[in-house]
Image (cartoon, rainbow, N blue to C red):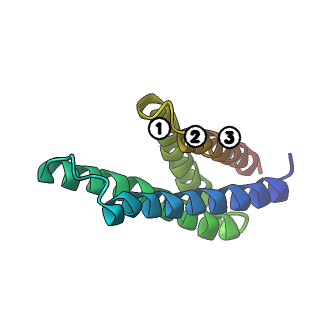
């Protein structure tokens, strides 16, 4: 696959990861607004909020950073390494989402998006290292 096509696909998947992160953060606040988490102790509630917001925010930041780096990767080939590192992080996150939330359709979406992004980052790294 050509480098330009990998970059284009990477941007699309990075935006999708960013959007998934926004949805995740919104989904964190929805039960809080409705009072659906009253069964949790205050300590457990704070821990759940923290972990959920960090997960969603990490997707937002990963997607945003990938979009920005992918714009410059052809100019600066060394950017393929941090892009791959983010791809590895997303792949691990996608796999863990299935481990911890097997019944959740968004976990499967995270797995597909994040593994796709990881495959794109590997392809991009290989292409740019061969130039």
Q: Position of residue 24 (x, y in %)?
A: 47, 57
Q: Nearer the viewer, residue 82 or 37?
A: 37
**Does 43 sit left or right of 11 as displayed?**
left
Q: Distance between the Cα atoms at labels 3 and 2?
A: 21 Å
Judging by the rendered image, the residue that carries numbered circle 3 is 119
Which comes sooner in the sequence, label 2 or label 1? 1
Residue beneath disc 1: 97
Packing grade of label 1 (10 A; few <14, some 14-19, many >=20) is: some
Q: Earlier in the sequence, mark 1 or mark 3?
A: 1
Name the front one of labels 1 and 3. Answer: 1
State yes or no: discs 1 and 3 in contact (Cβ < 8 Å).
Answer: no
- Residue shown at the point (51%, 48%) measured from the top left: 85
Residue found at x 65% / y 47%: 117
First reached walking from the N terminus: tag 3 or tag 2: 2
Image coordinates for residue 118, horizontal then vertical, percent: 62, 43
Q: Position of residue 81 (x, y in %)?
A: 56, 51
| Residue at the (37%, 63%) spot, across then down | 29
Whole-angstrom CA distance, mark 2 to mark 1, is 10 Å
């Amino acid at each position: 696959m050509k480098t330009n096509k990998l970059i284009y696909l990477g941007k699309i998947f990075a935006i999708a990861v960013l959007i998934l992160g926004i949805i995740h953060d919104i989904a964190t606040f929805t039960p809080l607004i409705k009072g659906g988490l009253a069964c949790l102790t205050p300590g457990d509630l704070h821990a759940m909020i923290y972990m959920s917001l960090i997960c969603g925010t990490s997707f937002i930041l990963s997607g945003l950073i990938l979009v920005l780096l992918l714009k410059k990767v052809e100019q600066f080939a060394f950017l393929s390494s941090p892009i791959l590192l983010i791809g590895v992080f997303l792949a691990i996150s996608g796999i863990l989402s299935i481990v911890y939330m097997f019944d959740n359709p968004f976990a499967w979406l995270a797995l597909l998006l994040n593994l796709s992004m990881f495959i794109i980052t590997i392809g991009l790294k290989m292409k740019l290292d061969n130039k």
